[in-house]
Amino acid sequence: MDHLLAAVDLGSNSFRLSIGRVVQQDGIAQIYAIDRLKESVRLAAGLDDDNVINEEAIERAITILKRFGERLAGFHPNRVRAVATNTFRIARNVAEILPRAEAALGFPIEVIAGQEEARLIFSGITSELPPSANRRLMIDIGGGSTEVIIGKGFQPLHMSSLFMGCVSYTRQFFVDGRITESRMQQAQFAARREFETISGQYRRTGWQEAYGSSGTAKGLLAVLMEGGMSKKGITLEGMEKLKAKLVKDGKVIMSELPGLKHDRSLVLPGGLAIMMAAFHELKIKLMLPGEGALRVGVLYDLLGRDSQHDKRDETVRQFMKRYHVDLKQSARVKRAALGFFSQLGLPDGPDKQELERTLGWVADLHEIGISIAHDDYHKHGAYILQHADMPGFSNDDQIMLSLFALGHQGKLGKLQARDPSRDKWLTLFCLRLAVLLSRRRDDREPMPISIQANGHSIRVNADESWLQKHPLTEFSLQAEKREWNKAGFEFELNPT
């Protein structure tokens, strides 16, 4: 399975598993699909008014994830990426659901932000299209959110995630399955208000090609083409004909809509209302189908990580530039922190590799909060890293970056509520020690300091004569010792 990658897309309407084989040709890596599974789960339909997913919907999800887990048996964890979208983002009981879902699947699940979802969708669609110098508009109507992107080549120019989807709108406006002109108008007006927030900017930028991904676009295309309502692609004229038929019938009659699948029929009115609103507000004339979307974007993102072209590295470089990071200082801290990390003796494996990468990134970014204010800059930096749009990083990735940024200086007690694991505590120790020893912001001679860790015991070995020549460093190390002792670690400063 060395040349296989797998992506799991936990959408609000459907769960999808895609497995691709990586093939290198003339120095270019391509991914060819070898297996796909799709199951309708309609997770968003299980949300109550308080955004709590009911047990029935959770059980449907768990059952499907167990099937996916059986197919993924034997895959190495770093060759599988599972991402969860809008319903997981908004569910108030997500903390209870995720452990059950991960146990069923057998792999970690990342809850990704709307902007990250839009980026991956753009990457997935673009990777499946022929090269073009044109700007392209892409719309993905999911079960709980709608992503709208304009990009050129492989570079997204505008990315938006709007809080509406085919499942949520069907629940809101067509809960009993009855379709009327009034209900369709209400749904369209609600969707147009969402699109209004981005339509001006998107129309000013402009595009030459429009693509629709996701089940909604494919379902509409099948119905319009096979039903003779459109000769090519999705058009407003064709959708008006479909809407008129649905209103006349008062419901979805599958036998009279060739090309419509059962699971798509359940959410057709909501998806149609949103797509019609998009055509009206963005002045779209013709939309063609876009293959790939989120799951293919996830596969190519995995390929990038596997080939040392991790999107997250690029994001970190952009953040360093945006927040005017002192590059020499971040390099000093990173070099020292990674040096100490190598002395921890953590067991090799994906967890260690991810901690090491995270340590390097947060060492690069630990001072970004200074761009706001020097006082409490670590708190400002932690807020940015948790809440900013960071392409390539999942919510969990950003939470870990934020944890380390918050904890790299000051009291450790503020982290107790977050309950980091032992290995995360030790990784944070490496960062704190590196920051402490780099306080002079100059390139000193190599510091005669090493560390040892065993369980919850930490030993810092330092040359005694060097400590005597650096009283501020020794004073700071003694203060650090008191902090770690209060955090439940045995800290020993050992002059040698």
Image (tube, grey):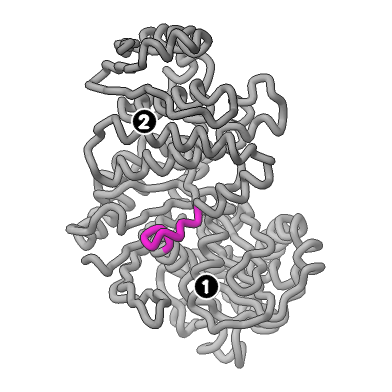
- Mark 2 vs mark 1: in front: 2
Q: What is the three-letter code of the residue carrying label 1?
A: Ile
What's the residue at 61%, 74% (across, down)? Answer: 153
Q: Nearer the viewer, residue 319 or 261?
A: 319
Q: Which quarter of the image is occupied by the N terminus? A: bottom left
> Over which residues does the magenta segment extend?
304-312
What residue do we see at 38% from left, 30% from top? 427
Identify the residue at horizontal 63%, vertical 72% (top origin).
247
Q: Nearer the viewer, residue 236 or 472?
A: 472
Look at mark 2 in the image and give the residue it sits on: 340
Number of callouts in the render?
2
Residue 137: x and y, percent? 66, 72
Residue 421 vs residue 447: left or right?
A: left
Disc on res. 125: 1
Q: CA distance from mark 2 to mark 1?
A: 42 Å
Q: Is residue 266 above or below residue 337?
A: below
* Residue under the image location 63 percent in, 80 percent down: 287
**What residue type is disc 2 on?**
Phe
Nearer to us in this view, 283 or 412 = 412
Q: Is residue 87 visible?
A: no
Q: Residues within 10 Å of mark 2 (few under 14, many from 20)?
A: many
Residue 466: where, in percent of width, then height?
42, 14
Instruction: Determine which of the numbered discs, if any, sits on residue 276 in the image.
Output: none
Sort mark 1 into few (<14), some (14-19) or many (20+) by Cα contacts within 10 Å.
Answer: many
- Element marked by disc 1: helix
* Label 2 SS: helix
Residue 324: x and y, percent? Answer: 69, 41
Q: Earlier in the sequence, mark 2 or mark 1?
A: 1
Residue 339 shows in this picture? yes
